[in-house]
């Protein structure tokens, strides 16, 4: 069953056509990669899926539901989580709090309940905290749970973003260049983590990456974007040898 | 003077009593602004506007309509909250500095309104406000507000407010309805502003629009910032310093503002996060904890 | 009657525009609301007053000298209160610092000159000229002429000179400008200087025109001029000019045709209206955030 369907998605920014008629289908449970040269429109695509932009044309369908004009926070509550290309952590909050905020979309205690400290709210707080701690344990940051988020090392910050996104109990997880700035050891850990969460949490994962070896290793299918268009799609072996893909990365005549 | 206060002056110098009452009121006002600006990161430079709405509304209800003290206070605060909500809706989609401008504009419009408001006495002001506010009422309410704020800021909602300040787009991606929460923070903060205003007018016996001008908004903003943005102890400390300082500096009365202005600049250069800005109770506990371990080992 | 009011509005608006330009240029480059700018304007008015009263300068000479004085003052303020905060602190701290300077300067003047209103001696003949059915005072002509001259001069400088190009570059991207070899510190100081000079000119002219100079005149005028700059699109020089002129006209018209007691609220009412309809101001550009 397809989790996410893009039909003819186009995006215009005042004359610049960042995306042009992109079609894509992401099946449940797969790890789907999106690659392409810089400026190809990968992050724009992510921003459309998460409701930050409204697509100029086309349909965005999540689990049989058209979500073109849905606001970001509602899309999050539907079960789409994401990490960001330029890390967007809550810098002056603790690591633990970052993850706890992540579960906002699935918790319920409102303003007055929080003010009054009702038992239902206290119970929920306990749940939020224990889930956050579990996730921190999963990404290996439990020991640093009281650190300010901006005190973490770069690779740790990326892992924290993943933990925060997972707190939402998403069914679809968007990872925007999660390996950027990591060394090879960290990348191996990351790949293991991605596999692990896909398995344990029954996730579908959409991944934008520049690191080819990583993408080729863990993705089951890959789509290639160039100048806002999808120029190829298929399993890694096909993509590796696709003429158009090679040309777009190396330039024509290479 | 309020009857209770009169008795208290047998034990406490009336000068200090007055300072403590004003401190309590300022804490309530500052906590309201803290919620809007310190916690949720929405720069409001017109908080005095909400204070004046609460002050005038509750005063007129007391004098003209014979409302009870509590009802007058709550109604005044509710009206202020209503305006906070009204202002919030269209303007909270504006970016930081623009929002600041609108809040300044709003407060100025309110001030001009009251300058022309017949039942409020226009420029002459309003007097004859029953002095229901005393030490106990102020501090009872202040402590309640402190407790509620503390609980709120430790909760899911509190974290959501902080998240909006830290990174609004990331906050939205976790399911936080940022617009709704910003408006909520604004409304709650202006409620407290109105509450403080009501307490103020029922203490001062006499109010006029000049009490609630731009400088007042700046004063309140400084209380929030000086102590440490978003932190309750910080806001209390800031209120403490800025309530006391004018009194303490009375010796150099004329030069007081000169020092104040220079102090702001110096403080921002050397301690831009406020005095308690970078300090967390958790870190303090850790440091004390470590000391104990040291002694054990020796 | 209408044309008279329009003329009065343009006159007042010109002075607002001169002040607004300072706000907009500084904001364009360093994203700082220079709250102390109103006080520079006030210092300009006083400087002119002193030069005319005690040193017998004529109006133009006093204005030029006041402009020079305020240029230095503006540069000094930037060095002491804003530069240390640049880059490393939040925008809010810079704002608070600016407020601190504003309080300091206005109090300083109040201590030095007392809080009473001072008046310029006769520096300009009370001459009237007739243009059709209109009466223009000499001072009005002077204000309109000088303002126009200064604004045209500014546009020329910004568009046609090297330093102007540097200013434009810095307002687009400060870091890139630095990497391109532009002495960013110097450009910023220069921007403050120019803005302060314009404000000083406005201060002197307002002081003479309304025959009133007092230490707190910078507060309200500053707030309004800033509102005008935001209405026109903060960061846009033509925007500040249009914003200032529009505000002056609206204010005078409002007083003439609606009510004078709400005069001060007109500026802010208009500001809120504009921001609600067109958040980036009349001439501002929509800034999209990179996500």
Image (cartoon, rainbow, N blue to C red):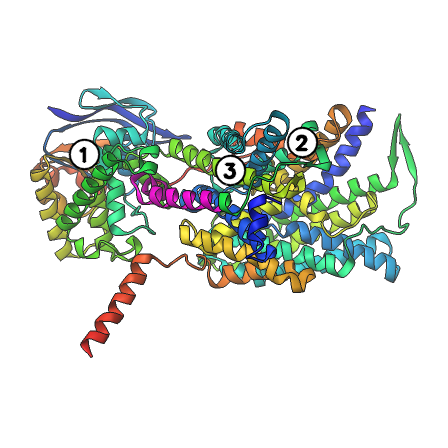
Given contact means CB atoms under 8 Å apart, are the residues at marks 2 and 1 in contact? Answer: no
Where residue C229 appears, as percent x and y from the top left, is 61, 40
Q: CA distance from mark 2 to mark 3?
A: 18 Å
| Residue that appears at 27% across and 25% down | A9
The mark that comes first in sequence, 2 or 3, is 2
Identify the residue under disc 1. Answer: A170
Mark 1 surroundings within 10 Å by alpha-carbon count, few (fewer than 14), some (14 through 19), many (20 or more)? many
Residue C180 can be seen in this image: no
Where residue B121 appears, as percent x and y from the top left, is 70, 32
- Mark 3: secondary structure: helix
Q: Nearer the viewer, residue B85 or C218?
A: B85
| Residue that appears at 48% across and 39% down | B192
Start and end of the magenta stretch?
Answer: B139-163
Q: Nearer the viewer, residue C290 or A117?
A: A117
| Residue that appears at 41% across and 30% down | A15
- Mark 2: secondary structure: helix
- Give the image quarter of residue B52: top right
- Mark 1: secondary structure: loop
Chain at tag 3 = B
Marks 2 and 1 belong to one chain: no
Tell us which disc is closer to us: 2 or 1.
2
Q: CA distance from mark 1 to mark 3?
A: 42 Å
Q: Is residue A40 above or below residue A66?
A: below
Q: Nearer the viewer, residue A81 or B53?
A: B53
Q: Nearer the viewer, residue B279 or A219?
A: B279
Identify the residue under disc 3. Answer: B195
Q: Is residue B8 left or right of residue B206?
A: left
Where residue C5 appears, as percent x and y from the top left, is 79, 29
Identify the residue under disc 2. Answer: B120
């Amino acid at each position: 069953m397809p989790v996410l369907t893009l039909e003819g998605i186009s995006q215009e920014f005042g004359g610049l056509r960042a995306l042009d008629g992109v079609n894509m289908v992401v099946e449940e449970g797969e790890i789907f990669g999106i690659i392409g040269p810089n400026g190809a429109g990968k992050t724009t695509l992510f921003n459309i899926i998460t409701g930050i932009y409204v697509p100029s044309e086309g349909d965005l369908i999540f689990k049989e539901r058209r979500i073109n004009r849905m606001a970001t926070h509602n899309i999050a509550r539907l079960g789409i989580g994401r990490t960001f290309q330029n890390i967007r952590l809550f810098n002056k909050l603790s690591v633990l709090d970052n993850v706890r905020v992540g579960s906002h979309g699935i918790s319920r205690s409102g303003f007055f309940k929080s003010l009054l400290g009702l038992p239902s709210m206290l119970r929920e707080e306990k749940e939020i905290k224990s889930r956050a701690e579990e996730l921190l344990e999963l990404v290996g940051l439990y020991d640093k749970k009281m650190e300010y988020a901006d005190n973490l090392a770069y690779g740790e910050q990326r892992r924290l973003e993943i933990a925060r996104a997972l707190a939402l109990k998403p069914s679809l997880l968007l990872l925007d260049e999660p390996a950027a700035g990591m060394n090879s050891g960290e990348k191996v850990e990351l790949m293991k983590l991605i596999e692990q969460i896909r398995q344990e949490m029954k996730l579908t994962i959409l991944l934008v990456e520049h690191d080819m070896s990583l993408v080729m290793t863990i993705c089951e299918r890959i789509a290639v974007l160039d100048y806002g268009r999808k120029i190829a799609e298929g399993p890694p072996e096909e993509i590796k040898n696709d003429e158009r893909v090679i040309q777009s990365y190396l330039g024509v005549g290479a | 003077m309020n009857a209770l206060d009169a008795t208290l002056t047998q034990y406490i110098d009336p000068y200090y009593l007055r300072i403590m009452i004003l401190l309590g009121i300022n804490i309530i006002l500052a906590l309201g602004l803290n919620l809007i600006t310190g916690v949720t990161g929405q720069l409001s430079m017109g908080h005095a506007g909400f204070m004046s709405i609460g002050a005038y509304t509750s005063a007129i209800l007391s004098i003209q309509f014979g409302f009870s003290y509590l009802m007058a206070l709550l109604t005044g605060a509710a009206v202020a909250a209503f305006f906070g909500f009204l202002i919030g809706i269209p303007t909270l989609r504006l970016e930081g500095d623009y929002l600041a401008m609108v809040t300044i504009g709003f407060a100025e419009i309110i001030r001009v309104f009251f300058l022309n408001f017949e039942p409020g006495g226009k420029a002459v002001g309003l007097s004859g406000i029953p002095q229901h506010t005393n030490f106990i009422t102020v501090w009872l309410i202040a402590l309640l507000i402190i407790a509620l704020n503390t609980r709120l800021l430790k909760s899911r909602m509190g974290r959501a407010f902080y998240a909006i300040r830290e990174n609004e787009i990331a906050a939205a991606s976790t399911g936080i309805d940022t617009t709704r929460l910003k408006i909520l923070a604004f409304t709650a903060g202006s409620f407290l502003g109105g509450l403080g205003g009501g307490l103020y007018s029922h203490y001062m016996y006499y109010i006029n629009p000049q009490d609630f001008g731009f400088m007042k908004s700046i004063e309140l903003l400084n209380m929030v910032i000086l102590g440490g943005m978003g932190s309750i102890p910080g806001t209390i400390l800031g209120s403490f310093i800025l309530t006391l300082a004018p009194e303490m500096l009375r010796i150099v009365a004329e030069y007081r503002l000169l020092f104040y202005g220079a102090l702001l600049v110096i403080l921002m250069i050397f301690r831009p996060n406020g005095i308690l800005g970078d300090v967390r109770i958790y870190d303090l506990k850790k440091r004390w904890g470590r000391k104990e371990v040291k002694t054990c080992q020796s | 009657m209408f044309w008279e009011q329009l003329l009065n509005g343009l006159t007042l608006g010109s002075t607002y525009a001169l002040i607004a330009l300072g706000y907009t240029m500084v904001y364009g480059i360093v994203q700082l609301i220079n709250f102390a700018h109103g006080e520079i304007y006030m210092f300009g008015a006083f400087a002119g007053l002193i030069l005319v009263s005690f040193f017998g300068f004529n109006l133009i000479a006093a204005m030029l000298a006041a402009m020079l004085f305020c240029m230095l003052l503006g540069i000094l303020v930037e060095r002491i209160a804003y530069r240390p905060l640049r880059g490393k602190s939040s925008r809010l701290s810079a704002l608070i610092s600016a407020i601190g300077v504003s309080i300091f300067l206005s109090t300083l003047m109040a201590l030095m000159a007392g809080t009473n209103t001072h008046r310029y001696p006769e520096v300009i003949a009370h001459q009237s000229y007739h243009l059709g059915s209109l009466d223009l005072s000499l001072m009005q002509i002077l204000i309109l002429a000088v303002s126009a001259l200064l604004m045209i001069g500014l546009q020329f400088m910004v568009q046609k000179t090297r330093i102007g190009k540097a200013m434009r570059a810095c307002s687009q991207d400060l870091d890139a400008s630095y990497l391109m070899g532009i002495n960013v510190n110097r450009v910023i100081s220069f921007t403050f200087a120019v803005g302060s000079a314009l404000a000083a000119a406005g201060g002197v002219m307002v002081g003479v025109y309304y025959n009133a100079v007092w230490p707190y005149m910078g507060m309200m005028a500053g707030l309004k001029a800033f509102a005008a700059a935001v209405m026109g699109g903060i960061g846009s020089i033509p925007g500040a000019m249009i914003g200032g002129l529009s505000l002056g006209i609206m204010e005078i018209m409002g007083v003439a045709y609606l009510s004078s007691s709400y005069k001060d609220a007109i500026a802010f009412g208009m500001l809120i209206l504009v921001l609600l309809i067109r958040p980036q101001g009349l001439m501002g550009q929509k800034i999209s955030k990179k996500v």
